[in-house]
Amino acid sequence: MPGPLQIMPGLVVSEAELSWRFSRSSGPGGQHVNTSDSRAELSVDLTRVLPPHLLARALERLGTRLTNGVLTVAASEHRSQLQNRDAAAERLAQLLRQAVASPPAPRRPTRPTRGSKERRLQVKRQRSELKRGRRGRPDD
């Protein structure tokens, strides 16, 4: 996955800021797995990449995943290093998208409508009638 990493329309991480590491991956692969470095780790220093207002938001949301401001993701689910590189890049982009997204608008409390109150009470009356009809009274 050469080239810059597109996070959002206004936010692109240059290739120079991305740090790749490769290692041996666990899992299936036979003898091939013992000789190929297919596991991909992608790291980026958020303090160098993000503007201050987005950095504060990202540090708050990704606090437990960061090591000295560096975010690292790993991918080893594929047998191919290229596929793992693509997966790691997409995972990093998705994490950063979620971390810098603006917070949702606060919920505005609403009151139940007259119709919804009447429907609720009507259902309660019907239920009450049904249960009253089940009471075991001796016939007169």
Image (cartoon, rainbow, N blue to C red):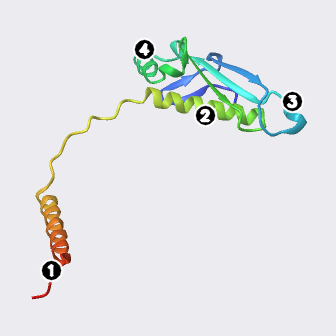
Residue situated furthest bottom in the rendering: 140
Q: Which residue is mark 1?
A: 137
Front disc: 3 or 2: 3
Residue situated furthest right in the rendering: 31
> The C terminus lies in which quarter of the figure?
bottom left
Query: Which SS class for mark 4?
Result: helix
Residue 38 point in image, percent of width and height: 78, 30
Mark number displayed over residue 90? 2
Q: Which residue is mark 4?
A: 52
Q: Nearer the viewer, residue 120 or 16?
A: 120
Query: Which SS class for mark 3?
Result: helix
Q: Are marks 3 and 4 in contact (CB under 8 Å)?
A: no
Marks 2 and 1, how far apart at CA: 69 Å
Q: Give the residue type at disc 3.
A: Asn
Front disc: 1 or 3: 1
Q: Which residue is depicted at the point 66% across and 35% down?
A: 87
> The N terminus lies in which quarter of the figure?
top right
In this view, 89 is above or below 139: above
Marks 1 and 4, how far apart at CA: 75 Å
Q: Give the residue type at disc 4.
A: Pro
Mark number displayed over residue 34? 3
Query: Which SS class for mark 2?
Result: helix
Q: Earlier in the sequence, mark 1 or mark 3?
A: 3
Marks 3 and 2, how far apart at CA: 26 Å
Q: Give the residue type at disc 1.
A: Arg
Residue 31 point in image, percent of width and height: 90, 35
Marks 3 and 4, how far apart at CA: 43 Å
Number of marks: 4
